[in-house]
Image (cartoon, rainbow, N blue to C red):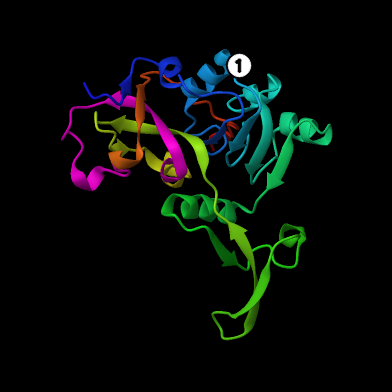
Amino acid sequence: MSGKVFPDAAAALFDFGDGASVMVGGFGLSGNPERLIEAVLAKGTRDLTVISNNCGNQGQGLATWLKARLVRAWKGSFMGGNPDIQEQHKAGLVDVELIPQGTLAERIRAGGAGIPAFFTPTGAGTVVAEGKEARTFAGRDGKAVVAILESALTADFAFVRARRADPYGNLQFHGTTKNFQFGMAMAGKTTIAEVDELVPLGAIAPEDVHLPGLFVQRIVVVADHKDPIEYRTTRPRP
């Protein structure tokens, strides 16, 4: 068994302490590393800086950290459907940096690629640009376009969720759960992968490896997940 495989989520979080910054994969409640989120809640680690698309939803996922007052700051792109982050931000309990979703993804990707900053026209001329350097470039059609400088994002830890892993940490994801997880795994100093299944080395064909094990330091196998559906919409049969 590889030294990367830990017996449970709590064991994998042995050095996850107060004041840590952490990227958490998933989009809404889809693709959440549920057991790692629960383990942090049980541990009670506080003053966290969380980087995620949205900080939980409907009181679930990362919203449980908010309810327990574990979060000091959050960087993400969507607050809708999450009254906990809205209320705590209004009360001055949590610092919030709202980031356009594409810019969030690129800042994370840049952090993993070792690119310290980049220029983007997204947000130029809006409150997003306040306090940021702006330059004028030639756009796609040759016309001048104003772009603002955005810094890369990295974190002490990255929590990702994958369908399967081998002992080296090569990961295969399921469908759209890929979302932010590739970039986060690369941008986290210590990446912990919560996986549904652990398979022998070589069982994942090279062309099916979505993320190389080079970017994964720890693995936790969790066979059962809640995988809640945020909003179920149905219609009567005709």
Residue visible at 28% across and 31% down in the picture: 165
Farthest residue, direction right? 91
Q: Is residue 199 left or right of residue 12?
A: left
Residue visible at 78% across and 35% down in the picture: 89
Image quadrant for the C terminus? top right
| Mark 1 secondary-structure assignment | loop
Q: Residue 125: horizontal and vertical position, in percent?
A: 75, 67
Residue 27 at least partly seen: yes
Q: Looking at the picture, which amino acid does disc 1 mark?
A: Gly
* Location of residue 15 with respect to 100 vertically, above or below: above
Q: Residue 159: horizontal and vertical position, in percent?
A: 46, 32
Q: Residue 204: horizontal and vertical position, in percent?
A: 21, 37
Q: 143 and 115: which one is in front?
A: 115
Farthest residue, direction left? 202
Image quadrant for the N terminus? top left
Q: Residues within 10 Å of mark 1 (few under 14, many from 20)?
A: some
Q: Is residue 206 magenta?
A: yes
**Label 1: which residue?**
44
Residue visible at 60% across and 35% down in the picture: 50
Q: 80 and 48: which one is in front?
A: 48
Residue 226 at least partly seen: no
Task: Write the start and end of the magenta stretch as one range.
Answer: 185-212
- In which image quadrant can residue 193 be found? top left
For the image, the number of numbered tags is 1
